[in-house]
Amino acid sequence: METGLFSQPGGTGVSMGRVMAEDAFEAVVGAHHAEIRRYLLRVTARASDADDLSQETFLRAFRAYRALPSGANVRAWLFTIATNLGRNHFRAQSRRRRAYAAVALEAPAGAPDRTDGRVLADEARVRVEQVIGGLPEKQRLAFIMRKMHELDYAEIGTSLCCSEESARAHVFQALRKIRKGLDSQLSAGTEPRS
Amino acid sequence: MSTMPTSCREIEPHLLASAMGEATRDSVELVRMHVAGCPECREELTRYRAVDGMVDSLRRAPGPDDDATLARAQLTSRLADLRSRMVTFGIFPSPLGPLLIGRSEMGVALVEYLPASGSLTARVRRLLGDDAVEDEAATEGLRAELIEYIEGRRARLAWPLDPRRMRSDFQRRVLEATAALPYGAVTSYAGIAARIGAPSAFRSVAQALRWNPLPIVIPCHRVIGSGGDLVGYAGKRVELKQRLLAVEGVNVGPHDFKVHREAMYTLMHGEVEYCLPTCGSLAERPLSALTLFGTRERAEAAGFGPCSSCRPDLHPLPA
């Protein structure tokens, strides 16, 4: 008289399929995963860390997704989760400078021809990356969110647990430091724009 | 910086905002007027614009590791795994007290009687783990059907079930045999043991049913002691068992909490006809060989006909 109780498909009107919130989450992954991973790549400067942390970001988001109010800014929320994970990651990693230096070395090497504007631009870009990598954590995260991902200051403030004004101050401070760090390049080769 | 004139210090934030292209119209105008008369700040603005341009080209440049394909594939598989393990639950009042229903992607995973008072958070976490999500809407259909069942308006809960809370293959077999007991019928723990081919294992059967993750849905309330006593249910809440049986037409003595065989229609295991309890040698048979029905309607709804010699249809038991 055994019925195969646990193998039979459902016979009632009660749907056991995925509920809508879960289907919607697939769309969230599709829309944002690549960008969140790119953000974490910029933040951690390591592809393997970006892979892990971007996955962790979405696993956490999935657990909390149902509780998210409808109409919430999903993208900014994902950035907040990713930012927190990134910061925890740094706390755990005492040698992040070295991790960054490793990436800087991967940048296009080659013998630069001083007269080649393209090479000069590449050099400047590597230098910018270096300077950004050396910024204090909050300034760096704020700057990457603002300038690389174009989040607004309110969203950045939420991600960093600070006010909109502090978020702006972090970005401005970052810009001042980058400008200082680039002084040599700027005076050497960049034509002033009109 | 310390030598910078006050007007230059004041203009500096506007200058940065201008260079980044996020200044208000007023700021832009302030900067324009200032740099017209201040070559140092004009130079600063140029430099900041150059920095902004570089940062912009950095933003647009594809990185060397800018391939999310692998991470995305891993994420998809980890999400599928999390989804299949994740239990969604609802807690709601019922005539039997507060109940929790938990479901996974596979099916209903858990039905739990909750204490009428006290904090539920720790209990729910212990039952379901940290990944459980409370979602009333996702369990609303189940809730409605379960209430109908408890109130006697529904005789069947044909839900797909998630077997992953089964503790062993033995328990699975016990629960499957229990689920095969018809609505309105009872047998003994030894009866279930006999049905799964382990006639001496009635104590293990009792244990397996004690840990039934799906009470009501898998009707362990239809399994009683060999002497007809209800034995136990949901801890010490044997009154719930009595109530569920009463809904199904099985009367339990109000004082002794027993099912009285002489008041039950009786089916020999393996037979297709149900009898009066006095038919032939039935009274001497152990309950384990029998299935008892409170009413003829239940026996017939389960597909059994009246015995052609004792004719329960012509001589029904007193109601």
Image (cartoon, rainbow, N blue to C red):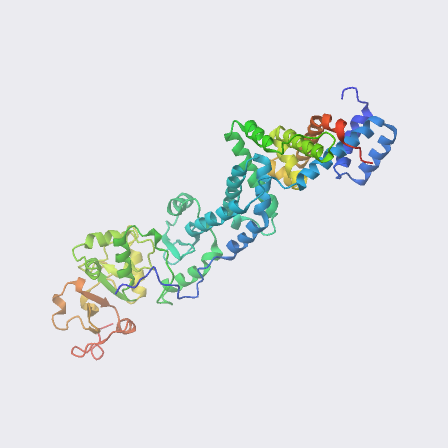
Residue B51, quarter of the rendered image: top right
Along the line of sight, the residue nearer the viewer: B100 or B163: B163
Residue B302, quarter of the rendered image: bottom left
Is residue B270 left or right of B123 when viewed as pictured? left
Relative to A11, say whether A116 is above or below.
above
Give the position of the C terminus of chain A as an image quadrant: top right
Estimate the x, y position of residue A3 in percent, counting from the top left.
30, 64
Estimate the x, y position of residue B4 in percent, counting from the top left.
79, 22
Estimate the x, y position of residue A100 in percent, counting from the top left.
57, 30
Relative to B111, say whether A190 is above or below.
above
Relative to B234, say whether A3 is above or below.
below
Relative to A27, say whether B39 is above or below.
above
Q: Report the number of numbered marks.
A: 0
Along the line of sight, the residue nearer the viewer: A193 or B319: A193
Is residue B41 left or right of B94 when viewed as pictured? right
The residue sitting at 11% across, 70% down in the picture is: B281
Q: Is residue A150 visible?
A: no
Q: Residue furthest right?
A: B37
Q: Residue furthest top?
A: B3
Is residue A138 left or right of B5 when viewed as pictured? left
Residue B154, quarter of the rendered image: bottom left
Along the line of sight, the residue nearer the viewer: A59 or A110: A110
Along the line of sight, the residue nearer the viewer: A35 or B95: A35
Estimate the x, y position of residue A87 in percent, counting from the top left.
55, 33
Give the position of the N terminus of chain A as an image quadrant: bottom left
Q: Is residue A46 visible?
A: yes
Is residue A98 left or right of B282 when viewed as pictured? right
